[in-house]
Image (spheres, helix red, strand yellow):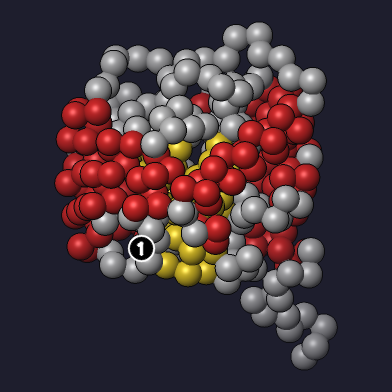
């Protein structure tokens, strides 16, 4: 299926890098490295140069912490989205928010995608996406309250539950008026899940791909990688790329990442091995 992300269209075989840009002082990975607007803008310029097709701008960290109301969230992202839109007209701008009020403001400022990491916690977000011809990312959280950690969560079949919830969310978005080509599903590793759930979703990601909806994976430096290898946040790249390779083989379309170059090379290598992509050059033994 051709993928339409706001004003941008991508072929059905194109794999996309979504680079993370945190407008927060306390993000788990970069510890506020892009909290200052100019630092965040430098990050955007860097990932564009590295080949990212999408930036995902977030104004609130996912983990519990200081309460951030809608006004504060908007102050962190709306003007920044407008600045990025003006400077990079060919870039897909995504905003990580679950609030319809914030979604409306960032779409007016030029955002193309609303990345709802909290599984439809605000039911009006789909209406905002439809009103602005924006794309929407439909995630699975098992009904978790935004910014809470999972505690003894159980599923009879986490993959079946994830497929049921994300496709239902996707159907609701289409019913609200979102272009069917602009609806993406995301298993949301770690959100409302323990490590065993995230590993199961990784192993069986092909079942999500088989729904026909484009699948986004957000694997970068996640806790399920850290717990699997007993590694802290700053040492999870190799494990992240291993999980990425598994998801790439299964057919994931969008990769939400901190490390753009390494992820691109991993995904491209998988696609070459799978026969979906030709080698960039192949002269060995031929001359």
Quadrant, the N terminus = bottom right
Residue 126 seen in this snapshot:
yes
Residue 5 in the image: above or below residue 185: below
Residue 54 in the image: above or below residue 201: below
**Count of marks, rendered view:** 1
Residue at screen point 70% across, 72% down:
277
The reply, left or right, for residue 177 in relation to residue 211 is left
**Could you say where residue 194 lies in the image, as x and y percent from the top left?**
66, 19
The reply, left or right, for residue 284 in relation to residue 92 is right
The residue lying furthest to the bottom in this view is 287
Residue on which the image places disc 1: 91
The residue lying furthest to the top in this view is 152
Image quadrant assignment for residue 203: top right
Residue 7 in the image: above or below residue 178: below
Quadrant, the C terminus = bottom right
**Could you say where residue 44 lies in the image, as x and y percent from the top left?**
31, 53
């Amino acid at each position: 299926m051709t993928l339409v992300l706001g004003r941008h269209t991508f072929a059905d075989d194109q794999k996309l890098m979504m680079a993370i840009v945190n407008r927060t002082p306390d993000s788990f990975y970069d510890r506020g490295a892009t909290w200052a607007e100019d630092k965040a803008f430098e990050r955007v310029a860097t990932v564009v140069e590295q080949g990212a097709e999408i930036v995902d701008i977030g104004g609130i960290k996912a983990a519990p912490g200081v309460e951030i109301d809608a006004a504060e969230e908007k102050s962190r992202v709306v003007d920044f989205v407008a600045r990025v839109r003006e400077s990079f007209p060919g870039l897909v701008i995504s905003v990580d928010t679950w609030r319809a009020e914030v979604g409306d403001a960032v779409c007016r400022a030029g955002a193309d995608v609303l990345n709802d990491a909290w599984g439809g916690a605000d039911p009006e977000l789909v209406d905002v996406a439809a009103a602005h011809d924006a794309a929407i990312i439909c995630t699975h959280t098992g009904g978790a309250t935004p910014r809470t950690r999972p505690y003894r969560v159980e599923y009879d079949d986490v993959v079946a539950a994830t497929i049921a919830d994300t496709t239902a969310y996707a159907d609701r978005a289409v019913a609200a008026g979102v272009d069917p080509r602009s609806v993406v599903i995301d298993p949301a590793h770690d959100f409302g899940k323990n490590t065993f759930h995230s590993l199961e979703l990784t192993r069986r990601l092909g079942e999500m791909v088989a729904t026909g909806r484009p699948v986004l994976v957000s694997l970068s430096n996640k806790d399920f990688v850290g717990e699997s290898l007993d590694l802290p946040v700053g040492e999870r790249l190799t494990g992240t790329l291993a999980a990425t390779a598994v998801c790439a083989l299964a057919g994931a379309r969008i990769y939400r990442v901190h490390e753009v170059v390494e992820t691109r090379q991993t995904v491209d290598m998988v696609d070459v091995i799978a026969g979906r992509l030709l080698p960039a050059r192949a002269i060995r033994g031929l001359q």
